[in-house]
Amino acid sequence: MLKILTTAACAAALAGCASRAENIAASYASPVAYAPLNCQQIAAEASNVSARVAQLTQTQNQKAVGDAVATGVALVVFWPALFFISGDGATAGELGRLKGEALALESASRAKNCGIQFRPA
């Protein structure tokens, strides 16, 4: 019985951990929103989105590491550490949205033959 409870507690703890930034999928964003922009405006917006994605990536990865540490401590030493696991939240949602916007900007750039080079994070 104790083994079943321990296994269930481990599974619950791991399910609540924050995801690494690279594991967060892009949300859909329509490239139509960027259709009125010219190439220079698309490049500026892409630069802004890219900078924010970089910030959120760092924050999300820090959350993931913190949750992994708290889970390890909780499973090995001190179970109340499970209360410090934050999981995915607003940061992950915003990161997914911005990844989608980056894809939409890339699509709008291709449609206008802007020649802007998009590189993965």
Image (cartoon, rainbow, N blue to C red):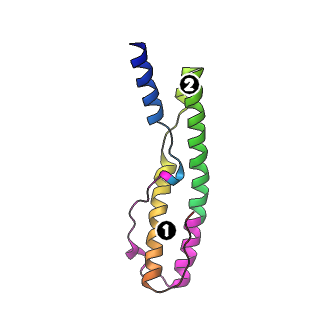
Query: Disc 1 residue type?
Result: Ala
- What secondary structure characterizes most of the magenta part? helix
Q: Nearer the viewer, residue 86 or 3?
A: 3
Q: Is residue 35 magenta?
A: yes
Spot occupied by residue 48 in the image (x, y as percentages of width and height): 58, 68
Q: Residue at x 52, y 54 (%)?
A: 22
**Which residue is most to the bottom?**
113
Instruction: Tell me the mark number nearer the camera, choosing from 2 and 1.
Output: 2
Q: Residue at x 39, y 19 (%)?
A: 4
Q: Nearer the viewer, residue 54 or 10?
A: 10
Q: CA distance from mark 2 to mark 1?
A: 38 Å
For label 2, the residue is 74
Spot occupied by residue 67 in the image (x, y as percentages of width and height): 56, 36
Above or below, comparing residue 94 to residue 31 in the picture: above
Left or right: residue 58 versus residue 97 is: right
Query: Disc 2 residue type?
Result: Ala
- Labelled disc at residue 102: 1
Mark 2, other Cα within 10 Å: few <14 / some 14–19 / many ≥20: many
**Which residue is most to the front?**
3
Spot occupied by residue 109 in the image (x, y as percentages of width and height): 47, 80
- Labelled disc at residue 94: none
Q: Marks 2 and 1: CB-CB under 8 Å?
A: no
Q: Is residue 72 magenta?
A: no
Above or below, comparing residue 76 to residue 88 in the picture: above
From the image, which quarter does the C terminus lie in? bottom right
Above or below, comparing residue 36 to residue 63 in the picture: below
Magenta residues, as a range?
A: 23-50
- Per the image, label 2 sits on a secondary structure element best described as helix
Q: Earlier in the sequence, mark 2 or mark 1?
A: 2
Spot occupied by residue 80 in the image (x, y as percentages of width and height): 55, 22
- Per the image, label 1 sits on a secondary structure element best described as helix
From the image, which quarter does the N terminus lie in? top left
